[in-house]
Image (cartoon, rainbow, N blue to C red):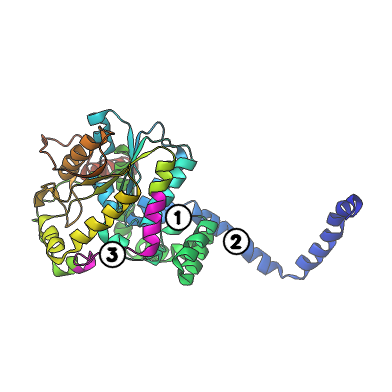
Amino acid sequence: MSIESVASMPSRWFPRLRAVLGRLPLGFLGTLVLIALVESALGGMRLEIAPPPTLSWIASDDATRSGLGPIDVLCLGDSLIKHGLLPLEIERLIGKPSFNLAVSAAQPPTTEAMLRHALDRGARPSAIVIGYSPDMLLGGPSASVRNYPEILGPLELIDLAREARDRDFGTEAIIGSLLPSVRARFELRAMIASTVLDPKRERDREVTASMLLRNWSLNRGAQFTPERPEYRGEVSEADIERLSARRFWCNRLNMKAIERTIRLATDRGIRVYWLLCPVTPALREVRVASGSESKETAFVEGFLGRFPGLTVIDARESGLPSDCFVDPIHTSGRGALRLTKAAAAILADPTRTGLVRVSAPEVDWGDPPYETLHESEFAVRSAAGRLRR
């Protein structure tokens, strides 16, 4: 093709394009423009629309985009890590700046994506702490089809769907990635209904979102949850079933994602610590009696054989009592302080590798040194009250 013919192509294309557009109804073109404007506006409101679990995905991804700064220790995983490891306490104990990128209901591909995005966007940690709640290892990505489009682009979603061999997930996730109104359709319906029928409920939802974002920001991604005196450590049969406490196995997709996460870090000279988080004594009894805990141990030891530099911090027998939990699996602020202290002792010694069992030492509780969710809620409501006045 000659240079002259290439140069003449636009002049030949434009009349044809104008002819095609001229045959389209103006109303149709206007509708497309309106849809694009609405979707763009909704994309900019994702923090305002998202429910709390999804909000954690967005906030952590936004943290990697805005830059984490000089971080030495990066904590990644699901809500057990988000509730259980306090970056400010890690820094206080061992002098290493830290950040918690864990999110609610994270699966191994979520953790892998968070780490990859953080490294691609400039984070240079010397160590990472990862953690996986056993129940989050069982299923594929369809369980979090609402959340994945918040952190993955269309091409990443296609790769995830292809690896999971889940066409339905891929279709829904990609459409949700392109159209925020589709992925947030349930939240939008609830918002509209509560705004019209129950404005107080809508204001409470806004306070909850602001409260969580404030608490995560002040605690460098961690959630400092206050004590819950009414919870006595009880575990119902519904809890046991919901948490798959009597069985343990790992989905093929999740297995590969864990391997890639560890390899991604070790290839860059980053030490990897895998934290096995504690649960309430009653739930652990079920896991031990059913054999699921021993299966988890064998599963993790398989990674130790493939990655000699890996350190597994086993806190399942740490001795945390029931009053250090707010439900069967999530620690309160006091439980998090004790668990963080135990983990920090291992982080402080880079020579420790293999399986290391730890106990959670007592802490001088007094007034919590970090802002709790209750304090965050009070601050948000007080600020809202001053604005209304």
Relative side of 315 to 36, left or right: left
Task: Give yes or no for contact between labels 3 and 2 (Cβ–Cβ under 8 Å).
Answer: no
- Which one is in front, 149 or 114? 114
Q: Position of residue 120 (x, y in %)?
A: 49, 42
Query: Which portion, as a residue range, is magenta?
Result: 241-261
The residue at which mark 3 appears reads as 249
- Which one is in front, 114 or 266? 266
Reply above or below: 146 against 277.
below
Q: Position of residue 254 (x, y in %)?
A: 37, 59
Answer with the quarter of the image where residue 329 lies: bottom left
The residue carrying pointer 3 sits among few (fewer than 14), some (14 to 19) or many (20 or more) residues within 10 Å by Cα, namely some
Q: Secondary structure at mark 3?
A: loop
Which quarter shows the C terminus?
Answer: top left
Report how far apart the C-alphas of labels 3 and 2 lie in the structure. Answer: 47 Å
Q: Position of residue 232 (x, y in %)?
A: 8, 56
Report how far apart the C-alphas of labels 1 and 2 lie in the structure. Answer: 23 Å
